[in-house]
Amino acid sequence: MGKRPPYTTDIEAARYPHPPPPTFRPQPPTQWTPWLVPVIFVTNVAMFVYSMYLNDCPSHLDKDECLFTEKLGRFAFQPFKENPLLGPSTSTLRKLGALEKDLVVYDNEPWRFFTCMFLHAGVVHLLANMFSLLFIGVRLEQEFGFLRIGLLYMLSGFGGSLLSVLHLKHSAIVQTISVGASGALFGLLGSMLSELLTNWTIYANKCAALISLVVIIGLNLAVGFLPHVDNSAHIGGFLAGFFLGFVLLMRPQYGYVNRKYIPSGYDIKRKSKYRWYQYFFLVLSLIILLLGYAYGLVKLYIGNSEENFAFLENKPR
């Protein structure tokens, strides 16, 4: 007979299952509290109120010519035939920093590329732009933070102003100016499209999101062909924002987990933070942006900036 196995206690003989592997959670997306977009909103409204105060239509024209003089006093609007958007005069906007080619090129006032973004031609113009700013900008700032959205807003606005000033009509009699936040706002729209493309893996309903966004962008771009709308600023801002989106709005691909969110002693195969095409579009967009801005500035200050494209209407935006 074989030997009897040594005696063991029930505890020693028990077979316990292996403990479950430690769980880990990927880094939750940061939700920023938007404050920059509201500040931009308040600044635009305040600048319009100040422009109407400075304009003081009744002191320059007959009270009967100004609109709503009895109710608004010195804040009365210019005559409808002069400004159909219910706003100040062209000379007032020029004093406050409207975009004008001769002042930018020959009087060395490049700051007008940016100041024009905070001026508006009238109440109708202001309401349309501010509604778009709140609708688009607040969501983007919540997702990406004030720094990236602030850079995106200003650089897109500069791109819109640059293309706009290249195509502003001017003559010995009439100097056309351009004002408004349209270039920056179209930059936000363009960045939404590039953000969708570069962060493709994290979206669930990709095609639906792409189609709806393209429709919204198409409708907004179509507005640029209406009278008294500066289409060149729209196109310049949209293109700048589209390429800036590849640079500023990259997000980690789906399934990426930061190492600090993995428990110690637990080894997993981690995905790379970004996909190869995200890096490709980032580098390509940086090159296009640098070349585009450089070409526009050289054409404005050195080259022949009198040549205009027929489809770009040069009117106050």
Image (spheres, rainbow, N blue to C red):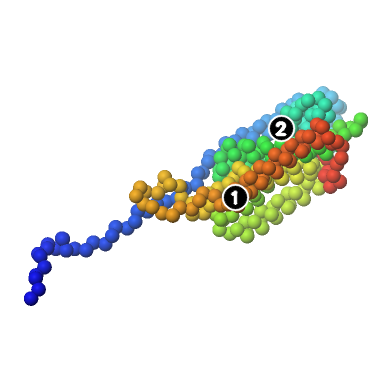
The residue at 86%/36% (across/down) is 304
Q: Residue drawn at (29%, 57%), measured in percent from left and top? A: 19
Q: Which mark is residue 313?
A: none
Residue 244, compared with residue 115, is above or below; it is: below
Q: Position of residue 192 (x, y in %)?
A: 64, 48
Q: Is residue 96 visible?
A: yes
Which residue is the site of mark 2?
114
Residue 201: image x %, image y %? 56, 55
User: Furthest-right residue in view?
Assistant: 172
Q: At label 1, which amino acid type do we have?
A: Gln
Q: Earlier in the sequence, mark 1 or mark 2?
A: 2
Mark 2 and mark 1 in contact (Cβ < 8 Å)? no
Q: Secondary structure at mark 1?
A: helix
**Callout 2, which amino acid?**
Phe
- Report the quarter where the N terminus lies: bottom left
Residue sitting nearer the eye, 19 or 215: 19
> Which of 190 and 120 lies nearest the eye of the viewer?
190
Residue that mark 1 sits on: 278
Q: Nearer the viewer, mark 1 or mark 2?
A: 1
Q: Residue furthest front?
A: 2
Q: Does any portion of residue 191 appear in the rendered image?
A: no
Q: Is residue 93 left or right of residue 19?
A: right
Quadrant of the image for the C terminus? Answer: top right
Query: Badge 2, how many Cα within 10 Å: few under 14, some, many 20+?
Result: many
Find residue 202 and report its horizontal and vertical position in percent: 55, 54
**Distance between the Cα atoms at labels 1 and 2?**
30 Å
Residue 53 occupies which quadrant of the picture?
top right
